[in-house]
């Protein structure tokens, strides 16, 4: 529905596209979350499980997202609208299920949930698959609102490192400083504002001269910084202890739970499940190969995640610290570690710049999904969409920034949530994080693969994938294993056990089931 007089924007070529998509994928998830999750879940053994999840679930779904975008030349809402059939048995079944759940909720006097589920059920009947696109736009909104707060902290810490204020003798001092910092509204809101401003300025400029241009500048810098940090930290005395902790496989720690954690992490890290890759794929030329692109983006994302662990753990162990939990590791332990090595302030500065770049290229992809919806479907001029929704996300994020640790500053909102839903997460920040990471993303990923597998059809998706990669999957798996990959099939027809056939099976059966299990695990129904 976009303005037909204006040609749709495009990437200038494959490199720009790959760097932008990799920029979206490489983010805070790689640099603070991945190393810590690996450390907790069995080191090298977990890395192995993670790699398998990326290869057999993540990559096939990424390929679907790219194909959906490039076939329709639309962002998620338009993509589903263009390809969805009017009546789909699957949608009606889901709709009826949700309505029944809503009625039960009302019977049990859960008024808020009941009303929510009934409304959702009606929306499912009204919009069908297009709702998956809308949920992507909403997820972009909610993720960016808390992501930008954390990214703002890195901005603040860059400033503090440059000013030499990160000289903490002990982790306890660093903790006190951090707690004080994130709770002071001036710093938290100011940094969050600056970060959103940067995202807005880049997305405002458009696909080629904004997102692509900045990805081409920032991604090589990111690579260079992480490399420098690895070399620096691996040469600290005692660094090998950290490498051992990070990578020694401990298969006893691999449980069903940790496999599902690996899957969830793979999805978040590859930016799947909310249509970022649909949107980015829609700006790609038909002559480019989606298959090579998927391989490069997945490979770069995994590489940087692994490198982040190599940059962080050696330093933490060399200085005799234990790997702490979550955000604490990078904002509390690392500054203390850097404080003890020569030129520490410089390395801390470099590290937070790295974190900022990673967050920035992810932040712009989130804002782009929201912007692209208003540009494609509502015919807004890009600039207006960017500013209006950037500002709206800033406001929502401000609530997150004000309630990072508890609800004390937003008591009215808290009381309302408790009244309507009878539950509330520890803070507004956690509520946004939970809503997007645990609900919208997994469900989005589930429906994207169900849609491609059963509604749009793997055959049509394959047609699109083969534009630019004509022989994708056209290889007999057994011949591949036997090293006879280039042997033409003797009867001329397509051989039965092709890679393409396996891709289809994964999309139709394996990914939906795996994502469903991971989802049930995170919301606690499967323990
Ligand atoms: N992948 C990013 C990270 O690792 C986060 C991110 C950006 C994201 N865009 C996304 C996650 C879209 C899910 C969906 O930090």
Image: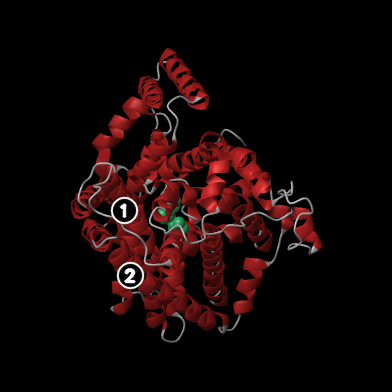
Q: With respect to residue 278, does 124 lie above or below?
A: above
Residue 293 disc label: none
Identify which residue is drawn at 33% across, 70% down.
Answer: 213
Identify which residue is drawn at 30% across, 78% down.
Answer: 162
Ligand 1 lies under 8 Å from the Cβ of mark 2 = no
Q: Nearer the viewer, residue 368 or 172?
A: 368
500 displayed left or right of 351: right
Report which residue position mark 2 lands on.
213
| Residue 327 in view, yes or no | no
On-image quarter of the N terminus: top left
Q: Nearer the viewer, residue 238 or 421?
A: 421
On-image quarter of the C terminus: top right
Q: Nearer the viewer, residue 126 or 224?
A: 126
Question: Which quarter of the rendered image does ligand 1 occupy?
Answer: bottom left
| Residue 339 in view, yes or no | yes
Query: Which residue is at the far bottom?
Result: 342
Report which residue position mark 1 lands on.
367
* Residue 32: x %, y % from top left: 47, 62
Identify which residue is drawn at 32% across, 72% down.
Answer: 158
Residue 183 appears in which quarter of the rendering?
bottom left
* Residue 313: x %, y % from top left: 55, 70
* Residue 15: x %, y % from top left: 44, 69
Mark 1, residues whose alpha carbon is within 10 Å: few (<14), some, or many (≥20)?
Answer: many
240 displayed left or right of 270: right
Q: Earlier in the sequence, mark 1 or mark 2?
A: 2
Mark 2, residues whose alpha carbon is within 10 Å: few (<14), some, or many (≥20)?
Answer: some
Q: With respect to residue 217, does 481 lie above or below?
A: above
Which one is closest to the eye, mark 1 or mark 2?
2
Colour mapping used in the image: secondary structure
Q: Secondary structure at mark 2?
A: helix
Mark 1 vs mark 2, CA separation in Å: 16 Å
């Amino acid at each position: 529905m976009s303005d037909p007089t204006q040609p749709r924007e495009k990437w200038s070529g494959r490199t720009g596209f790959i760097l932008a998509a990799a920029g979206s994928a490489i983010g805070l998830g790689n640099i603070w979350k991945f190393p810590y999750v690996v450390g907790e879940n069995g080191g090298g053994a977990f890395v192995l499980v993670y790699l398998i999840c990326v290869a057999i679930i993540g990559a096939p779904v990424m390929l679907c997202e790219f194909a959906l975008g490039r076939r329709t030349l639309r962002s998620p809402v338009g993509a589903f609208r263009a390809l969805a059939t009017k009546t789909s048995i699957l949608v009606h079944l889901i709709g009826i299920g949700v309505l029944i759940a809503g009625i039960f909720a009302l019977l049990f006097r859960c008024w808020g949930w009941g009303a929510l589920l009934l409304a959702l059920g009606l929306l499912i009947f009204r919009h069908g698959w297009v709702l998956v696109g809308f949920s992507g736009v909403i997820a972009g909104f909610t993720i960016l609102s808390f992501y930008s707060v954390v990214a703002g902290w890195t901005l603040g810490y860059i400033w503090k490192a440059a000013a030499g204020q990160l000289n903490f003798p002990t982790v306890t001092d660093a903790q006190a400083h951090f707690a004080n910092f994130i709770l002071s509204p001036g710093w938290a809101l100011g940094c969050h504002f600056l970060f959103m401003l940067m995202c807005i300025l880049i997305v405002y400029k458009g696909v080629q001269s904004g997102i692509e241009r900045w990805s081409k500048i920032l991604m090589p810098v990111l690579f260079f910084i992480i490399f420098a940090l690895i070399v620096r930290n691996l040469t600290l005395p005692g660094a090998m202890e950290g490498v051992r902790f990070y990578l020694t496989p401990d298969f006893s720690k691999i449980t069903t739970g940790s496999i599902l954690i690996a899957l969830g992490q793979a999805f978040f890290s590859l930016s799947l499940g909310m249509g970022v890759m649909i949107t980015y794929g829609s700006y790609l030329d038909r002559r480019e190969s989606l298959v090579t692109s998927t391989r490069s983006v997945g490979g770069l994302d995994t590489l940087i995640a692994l490198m982040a662990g190599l940059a962080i753990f050696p330093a933490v162990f060399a200085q005799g610290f234990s790997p702490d939990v979550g955000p604490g590791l990078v904002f509390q332990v690392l500054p203390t570690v850097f404080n003890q090595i020569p030129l520490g302030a410089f390395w801390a500065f470099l590290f937070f710049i790295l974190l900022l770049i990673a967050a920035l290229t992810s932040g712009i992809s989130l804002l782009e999904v929201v912007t692209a919806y208003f540009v494609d479907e509502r015919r807004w001029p890009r600039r207006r969409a960017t500013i209006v929704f950037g500002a709206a996300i800033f406001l929502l994020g401000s609530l997150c920034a004000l309630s990072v640790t508890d609800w004390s500053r937003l008591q009215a909102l808290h009381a309302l949530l408790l009244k309507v839903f009878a539950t509330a997460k520890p803070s507004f920040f956690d509520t946004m994080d939970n809503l997007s990471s645990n609900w919208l993303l997994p469900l989005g990923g589930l429906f994207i693969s169900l849609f491609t597998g059963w509604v749009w059809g793997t055959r049509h998706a394959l047609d699109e994938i083969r534009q630019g990669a004509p022989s994708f999957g056209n290889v007999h798996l057994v011949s591949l294993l036997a090293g006879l990959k280039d042997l033409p099939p003797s009867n001329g027809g397509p051989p039965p056990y092709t890679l393409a056939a396996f891709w289809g099976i994964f999309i139709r059966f394996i990914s939906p089931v795996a994502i469903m299990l991971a989802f049930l695990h995170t919301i606690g129904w499967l323990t």
